[in-house]
Image (cartoon, rainbow, N blue to C red):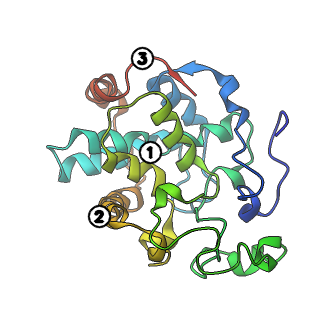
Amino acid sequence: MTGGAVAIIDPSEIYRPDVGNWECDCEREGFRNFSSALEELNSLVDESDPDVDFPNSFHAFQTAEGIRQKHPDKDWFHLTGLIHDLGKMMAIWGENQYCVVGDTFPVGCEFAKSIVYSDTTFTDNPDLKNPKYNTRYGIYQPECGLDNVLMSWGHDEYLYRVLRHNNTTLPDEALYCVRYHSFYPWHTGGDYDHLCNDKDREMMEWVKEFNQFDLYTKSPDLPDIQELVPYYQSLVDKYIPGALKW
């Protein structure tokens, strides 16, 4: 990838198994903490989300507070709600939104019909005619586990990698919510279970629980962010402290 946005139109080709794991040049953005990243996110409105026409940071606090109300004893879950969309920073740094937001799905195997718009936007994808990639399992083994599956690139995968790279102490349940909350063909469409192992199936329950708040806490009644900042800053300091490499 050269400087600027990725020159790809078909979203299903953004992360093909024979292209390799292209690294987003957003790493040039260097170090920042989560508080400053949330402030930067104020300039983004997600074009793929018809339910939100206000800055993404407000949605972050709405999601976190919804989780906090139902799960008051799970502070890691509150923080997950706050940070889950911070991978969308890539759009602020110049990436086109089609390779940052929207649903995610596996590549390297047959595309499920539950992938949104796949019937109209994947028609020219060469993987559809490639016998290595167009079968049920493709390049994978049965029940290989999602950690061994290549996913289409987006804000989920990017933030997951940022968290792992910076040695977060958030539990696996949180990392699954971050990495797979846009994987609707799996947790909502019921597809790709044949690639999942027992841990994936166990963790899906947390992803489903998380998505209730991601989807249904969106409201024009915006939270008082300044009042909430001290509590969430304490969680950031606990699980992902300091300046992080992005």
Identified by mark 1, the residue type is His
Q: What residue is disc 1 on?
A: 84
Q: Position of residue 196 (x, y in %)?
A: 43, 68
In this rendering, the answer to whether 58 lies above or below 173 is: above
Q: Position of residue 111 (x, y in %)?
A: 64, 76
Pointers 3 and 2 in contact (CB under 8 A)? no
In this rendering, the answer to whether 117 lies above or below 22 is: below
Identified by mark 3, the residue type is Gly
Identified by mark 2, the residue type is Glu
Gap between marks 3 and 2, in whole Å?
31 Å
Q: Position of residue 141 (x, y in %)?
A: 53, 70
* Residue 58, image quadrant: top left
Looking at the image, tell me whether mark 3 or mark 2 is earlier in sequence order: 2
Gap between marks 1 and 2, in whole Å?
20 Å
> For this rendering, which residue is in front, 217 or 133?
133
Looking at the image, tell me whether mark 3 or mark 1 is earlier in sequence order: 1
